[in-house]
Amino acid sequence: MFKGIFIKNFFNLIINQGINIFIALVATRVLFSTLGEAQYGLVNLALSVVLLSSITVSYGYHLNGPKRVALFRDDSAKKQTLINEIIVTRIIIAIGMAIILFCLTYFFGFFKSYASLLYYSLILLFSQALFPMFYFQGNDKIEWFSLVNIFAKGAYLLLIVLFIKTPKDATYVNFIFGFTALMVYIVFWIIIYKKEKIKWVWVSLHNIKKRFVENFQFFISSIAGHVSIHGGLIILASFVNNTILGEFALAQKIALLMRMVPVFFTQAILQKATILFEKDKIEFNSYVNRIFIIGLLVTFGMGLIAIILSKWIIFLLAGSYVIYSETILKILAFIPFLSMLNFNNMIKILVDEKKHLLTRATWITAIIMLVFATIGSYYYGGYGLSIALVITEIVSFIVYSILLIKNKHERA
């Protein structure tokens, strides 16, 4: 039964990622050739800033939200309360983050070189507030999210083909991305509410405060995780010109898409792993280890393929041979494999809700990444940053393992 559920969930997640990769290939080709390296780099830089900010909007509910939805699957009243409180909490945070980023840019001069890009990108915060993945994952309806993704990404691709014609149109790229997602998410939430007979009610400030408190550590750890993944491009922008930044962003986009595969393995088994953890620890360990081996083989194969085909992947994206981007992609190709090493550790932390361990591990990793990324970017530009990102994945695995072993001995 568990094997069948894993295969179903993983298959749907792979379909979803296949959609993302296809759209990314076509959209990147269109944007890179239309905007040029410099403007394309700034678009991705603004996107990285907003994505870092958007993790505050998720507020850790992408980690434990699915588990909570699964527990309340048969209790409509509790499910209604949970969903409304998560959405309202996220909307409030999105408004707050949009105001903060606007003030930092308009009054204090941050992000000056791409201020207008950043303003239009703020809509992504509100699309993140309504991101429905926690609901679909908690109800084992990941195929629904694939449908959501097809509509959102398909509309995005159509609109950039229709409206992005010159480098001056770079301002609207991230706005289109956020707007299409927001509209599709609103439509699907309306469908979900009607189907589940959920009523929309505004949440009391007292309950919102409770949500802030209960997920604070997941929120803090999520920030650190996104700093480790997306912070490098922001650091690199201080040491290289916009052309190099754009060529690096081209290769990093593929690496980030590939890096989602270990996340899919986690998402595909998390709910069932939670059940096994409560009922049978031996079967839990056996099940997780089997999936772990499969994940290592899959991600290692992906890395080899990316290295072998790097020249043609970049050509497909850029419309020309960009040697710098090709080399960066070769360095980053095994990041998914190294990330997969941490699969067992992450599953154990999430099913047992070891919030304090997750917070410590992610922040130790993030701080080390920031140090390595700054040094690497300063001395070697994108090459140094690429090596720093690879080292970060190895360090992350070591840190998580040490903290879990230490915690196990303390509890014994």
Image (cartoon, grey):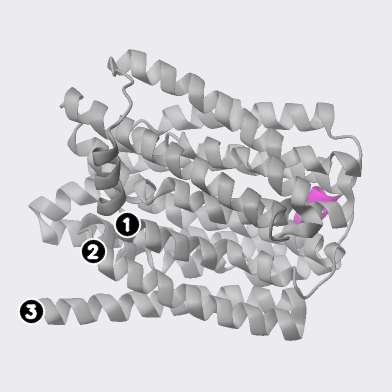
User: Is 26 left, or right, of 97 in this rendering?
Assistant: right
User: Is 4 left, or right, of 332 in this rendering?
Assistant: left
Work out whether mark 2 precedes mark 3 in sequence or the reverse, and give the earlier one. Answer: 2
Closer to the camera: disc 2 or disc 1? 1
Give the number of the disc on residue 412. 3
Work out whether mark 1 precedes mark 3 in sequence or the reverse, and give the earlier one. Answer: 1
Work out whether mark 2 precedes mark 1 in sequence or the reverse, and give the earlier one. Answer: 1
User: Is 355 left, or right, of 254 in this rendering?
Assistant: left
Q: Which residue is mark 2?
A: 354
Q: Amino acid at mark 1?
A: Phe
Closer to the camera: disc 1 or disc 3? 1
Q: Amino acid at mark 3?
A: Ala
**Residue that appears at 54% across and 53% down:** 53
Residue 51 x/y as whole percent: 58, 51
**Residue that appears at 57% across and 46% down:** 99
Against 386, residue 344 (above or below) is above
| Range covered by the magenta-colored residues | 313-318
Closer to the camera: disc 2 or disc 3? 2
